[in-house]
Image (cartoon, rainbow, N blue to C red):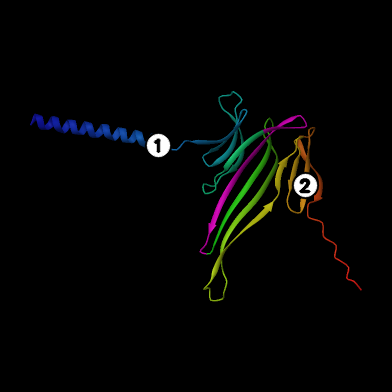
């Protein structure tokens, strides 16, 4: 009887120990509270509990933050980058990232990619400029006859918004197929001021005169 009780006690101890180890493994596999996407100087771009932030490490116990946006789990920021630059002697930061979303039907697939470009003045925690450029890649099955016996796959690209770029002076240029916009940085007011807009569309070819 004593031997039987001793064996039962050993089995219960082993079962309890295994349960503790299993629980510890589950805890270790938990997802991290935040995800760092990019770094520059004392800044990090991170996602914390579904929110996108810029964290400013000033040596304090609690970091300062700049809220960027709430993120969608189905379209999390990708290809995130932070770049320090100077505009008229003022240190600024450019934050860029992309978000993708795919829409599918039986005949069509659209992959929509949005490139975000945002300029921040970190000491004042101010967003000075924001730009979005959307590229949609479309793959579509197109029927060639009324009875839908023959078909072909067609691919096309749709672009919306402006391409964003920085000049050597820290000014901003937006450009698409038809126009170009420039924004000059005003160091006194610490803001971008809209400047010249020019046409980028190709010049129309004059019609040839018909001979009499």
The residue stretch that appears in magenta: 84-106
Mark sitting on residue 7: none
Query: For residue 19: magenta?
Result: no
Kindly identify the residue that appears in the image at 10 percent across and 30 percent down.
Answer: 3
Quarter of the figure with residue 91: top right
Which of 118 and 58 lies nearest the eye of the viewer?
118
Residue 114 in picture, x, y percent from top left:
62, 49
* Location of the N terminus (image quadrant): top left
Q: Residue furthest right?
A: 212
Q: Secondary structure at mark 2?
A: strand
Left or right, residue 49 beside residue 113 = left
Kindly identify the residue that appears in the image at 76 percent across and 29 percent down.
Answer: 89
Tag 1 and tag 2, C-beta contact below 8 Å:
no
Q: Secondary structure at mark 1?
A: loop
Quarter of the figure with residue 37: top right
Kindly identify the residue that appears in the image at 22 percent across and 31 percent down.
Answer: 13
Left or right, residue 170 beside residue 59 = right
Q: Residue furthest bottom?
A: 147
Residue 17 in picture, x, y percent from top left:
26, 31
Residue 78 in picture, x, y percent from top left:
56, 43
Does 103 sit above or below residue 212?
above
Check disc 1: other Cα within 10 Å, few if <14, some if 14-19, many if 20+.
few
Q: Residue furthest front?
A: 211
Mark sitting on residue 181: 2
Provide the major secondary structure of the magenta segment. strand
Residue 144 in picture, x, y percent from top left:
57, 71
Comparing labels 1 and 2, the label whose residue is closer to the camera: 2
Kindly identify the residue that appears in the image at 55 percent across and 24 percent down.
Answer: 61
Q: Where is mark 1, residue-wise?
A: 29
* Gap in angstroms between the C-alphas marked 1 and 2: 49 Å
In primary-sequence order, the first of circles 1 and 2 is: 1
Query: For residue 105: magenta?
Result: yes
């Amino acid at each position: 009887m004593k031997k039987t009780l001793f064996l039962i006690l050993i089995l219960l101890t082993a079962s309890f120990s295994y349960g503790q180890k299993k629980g510890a493994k589950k805890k270790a596999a938990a997802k991290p509270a935040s995800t760092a996407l990019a770094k520059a100087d004392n800044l990090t771009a991170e996602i914390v509990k579904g929110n996108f932030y810029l964290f400013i490490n000033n040596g304090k116990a609690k970091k300062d933050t700049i809220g960027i946006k709430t993120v969608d789990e189905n379209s999390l920021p990708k290809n995130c980058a932070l770049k320090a630059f100077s505009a008229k002697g003022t240190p600024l930061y450019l934050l860029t990232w992309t978000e993708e979303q795919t829409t599918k039907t039986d005949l069509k697939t659209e992959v929509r990619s949005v490139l975000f470009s945002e300029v921040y003045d970190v000491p004042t925690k101010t967003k000075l400029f924001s730009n979005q450029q959307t590229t949609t890649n479309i793959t579509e099955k197109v029927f060639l006859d009324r009875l839908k016996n023959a078909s072909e796959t067609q691919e096309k690209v749709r672009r919306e918004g402006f391409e964003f770029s920085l000049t050597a002076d820290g000014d901003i240029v937006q450009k698409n197929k038809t126009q170009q916009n420039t924004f000059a940085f005003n160091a006194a007011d610490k803001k971008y001021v809209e400047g010249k807009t020019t046409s980028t569309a190709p010049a129309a070819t004059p019609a040839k005169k018909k001979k009499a």
